Image (tube, grey):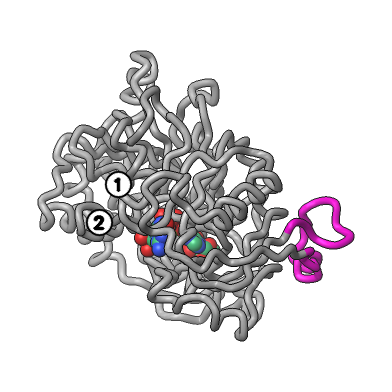
Amino acid sequence: MQWGDEGKGKVIDLLSERASHIARSQGGNNAGHTIVAKGQEYKFHLIPSGILYPHTQCYIGGGTVIDPASFLQEVEGLAKRSVSFRGRLHLSLYAHVVFPYHKKLDLLSEESKGLFAVGTTGRGIGPCYADKANRWGIRVADLVAPNFAERLKVTLAAKNREITLLYGCEPLAYEPMCEEYQGYAKALLEFIAPVEDLLFEASQREDRILFEGAQGALLDTTFGTYPYVTSSCTLAGGMATGMGIGPSRINRVIGVTKAYTTRVGNGPFPTELTQAQLQHFPGHAEARELGTTTGRKRRMGWFDACLVRHALKLNGADSLAITKLDILDGIDEIFICSGYRKMKHFPVTQEELRLAEPIYESHPGWKASTRSAFVYDDLPSKARAYLRRIEELIGVPISIVSTGPEREKTLWLDDFFGSIRP
Ligand code: GDP
Ligand code: IMO
Ligand code: MG
């Protein structure tokens, strides 16, 4: 519901306990999700965040972009930590493959944009999606097809013309790249599956399917803070197009948001904290606000109800999961932006968003730990008032409150799948 890193990984992991199928539909290894379970920390980029529960079937859909080296490294990480994945991690043949020229072009394009650089993760995501749209893409199906070497030769020749003639850089060598990717093709075979058919059958059986989003609503390529966005549809609607399932199969949408706001990468951020205000927050490492993928410090700001209301509309979220309430535990005075002065609608251009003047309301801090709360009513009354005000401003109920990175640090306000959680 914001600019990414809202704690989706934690929420997906929690809900996966009671889902049979977990499906990731868009983005690539630009995403980074951290889960803390049974005292251990896991970081996922492409692998669905529901993989830790051995009863789940996990899917990577046709709308994603796969960097095979990164994917295989993640799989190796699972093996090292004895997390089962054989026979329950399925990769769509329709997904597009990220090649070294995508990463090279990502970096070159950023350099050439100068002050207008997006601040990408440098993972080649934008150029890979651009190739998909302009029909230069190579899909998983094409990677494992007999004519892959031929296809790569033609594609690389075109990409090298861009790298040499447009950017004046050295061309990338064909032979080693072809050999490397032929190796990946073999290694990926065990994961490739008819994902679209498997999910259709699961939905026909009325199995419980959890579709997980990566990135944030404001990073959506159409409705986000363009051009400071990623290159895929990050909205709930994108689940259907990215997985190849009909929108009528989605019953419910949960929007994940922090109790404040963060952003990595460039672009305007109306409620961004001043250096002086930042001193009152826990440090970036303590607040777990160092990027999972790039290690960059996340920019931090107050909760922005105008932005989350906009995201709510775009996603049709039925309820909110609010994370990281505990990060506000020590702050004397907490601000919420209820709207932008003289602006009726969330601005479309970044020039307008840069001029947005937040209307702030002040809330007294609760100055007590929320981490030990076991049920919602254990929270300090000022923390509950803060959450109630957010609900009021956003107009949807809160269903989950998270007060720490660990699974147990979760307060359930909703009986999601029939039975009330302890
Ligand atoms: P995602 O990309 O949306 O999955 O979020 P990330 O995993 O990139 O970033 C969220 C960070 O906050 C991770 O380090 C999580 O472990 C951590 N986290 C999630 N929920 C909470 C919470 O309620 N409190 C605290 N302190 N940390 C949390
Ligand atoms: P998760 O799933 C936060 C941001 C980048 C950059 C912009 C474009 O962990 O929430 P890209 O490499 O996608 O072309 O970069 O999008 N970005 C994210 N920011 N969380 C993410 O994923 C992000 N994925 C991309 O920082 O501003
Ligand atoms: Mg993240």
Residue drawn at point x = 59 percent, y = 60 percent = 229
Residue drawn at 29 percent across, 44 percent down: 147
Name the residue: 32% across, 30% down: 19
Q: Position of residue 296 (x, y in %)?
A: 44, 75
Residue kind at label 1, given as amino acid type? Leu
Q: In terms of secondary structure, where does tag 1 sit?
A: helix
Q: Secondary structure at mark 2?
A: helix
Q: Position of residue 271 (x, y in %)?
A: 68, 68
Mark 1 or mark 2, which has the lower sequence index? 1
Q: Position of residue 312 (x, y in %)?
A: 64, 43
Q: Is residue 180 magenta?
A: no
Q: Is residue 298 above or below residue 1?
A: below
Visible residue check, residue 5: no
Q: Label 1 vs label 2: CA separation?
A: 8 Å
Out of 15 and 276, give the one closest to the viewer: 276
Q: As drawn, is 48 to the left or to the right of 127?
A: left
Q: Is residue 422 left or right of residue 287?
A: left
- For label 2, the residue is 181
Q: Is mark 1 within 8 Å of ligand 2?
A: no
Towards the viewer: 187 or 154: 187
Pointer 1: residues within 10 angstroms few (<14), some, or many (20+)? many
Query: Dividing the picture into quarters, in which one does residue 13 lie?
Result: top left
Q: Which residues are magenta?
A: 338-359
Query: Disc 2 residue type?
Result: Tyr
Contact? badges 1 and 2 (CB < 8 Å): yes
Which residue was labeled with disc 1?
143
Name the image quarter holding the C terminus.
Answer: top left
Magenta-drawn stretch contains 343 = yes
